[in-house]
Amino acid sequence: MASFGGSWKFIILFGIFIAVWISSNIIFLVNKGFDPYTFILLNLILSCLAALQAPVIMMSQNRQEEKDRERSEQDYMINLKSELEIRILHEKIDHLIIHQQQELLTIQQVQVEMLEDIMKQINLKE
């Protein structure tokens, strides 16, 4: 009901209803119809409609707020899980970098030893 009450279809239909009501009382019934010029009955109908529509709209807003709250909690949980996964990935990458640095140091030591051997051989030949 809240979705219909806030739709263009409702606004157009209600505008047509009010136009027909006013025109039928002023033009067709020459202001001696069932609701003469001050339109007291129309005002009563509009007041009753507003009195019924307001709580329905508020209930709809409350339901939407609950849905939004649930959605935000789900988003928070997803973000938290993503953050934990990213931390795990960072730890893995850090581990790989440390391990790679150790291997590079080992390779560099071997290269230095090889260079020293080459230098010794060159020095011996001279």
Image (tube, rainbow, N blue to C red):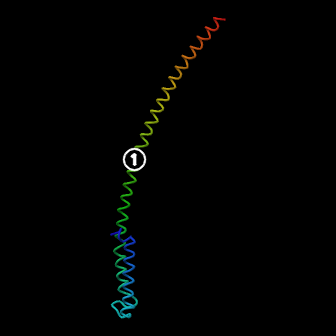
| Residue 23 percent coordinates (x, y) | 39, 87
Residue 67 as seen in the image, left or right of residue 99: left
Q: Residue at x 34, y 79 (%)?
A: 48
Instruction: Give the answer, above or below, for where 102 lies relative to 12.
Output: above
| Residue 55 percent coordinates (x, y) | 35, 70
Instruction: Give the tally of numbered discs.
Output: 1
Q: Residue furthest right?
A: 126
Characterize the local packing of mark 1: few (<14), some (14-19) or many (20 or more) Cα atoms within 10 angstroms: few
Q: Residue furthest front?
A: 125
Closer to us: 28 or 102: 28
Residue 15 quadrant? bottom left
Q: Residue at x 54, y 16 (%)?
A: 110
Find numbered disc 1 in the image and state the secondary structure of the residue it sits on. Answer: helix
Instruction: Give the answer, above or below, for where 100 lies relative to 88.
Output: above
Quadrant of image for the N terminus = bottom left
Instruction: Give the answer, above or below, for where 21 lies relative to 90.
Output: below
| Residue 59 percent coordinates (x, y) | 34, 66
Residue position for label 1? 78
Q: Residue at x 38, y 94 (%)?
A: 30
**Amino acid under disc 1:** Ile
| Residue 73 percent coordinates (x, y) | 38, 52
Closer to us: 88 or 114: 114
Quadrant of image for the C terminus = top right
Closer to us: 49 or 120: 120
Residue 113 quadrant? top right
Residue 120 quadrant? top right
Residue 2 as seen in the image, left or right of residue 99: left
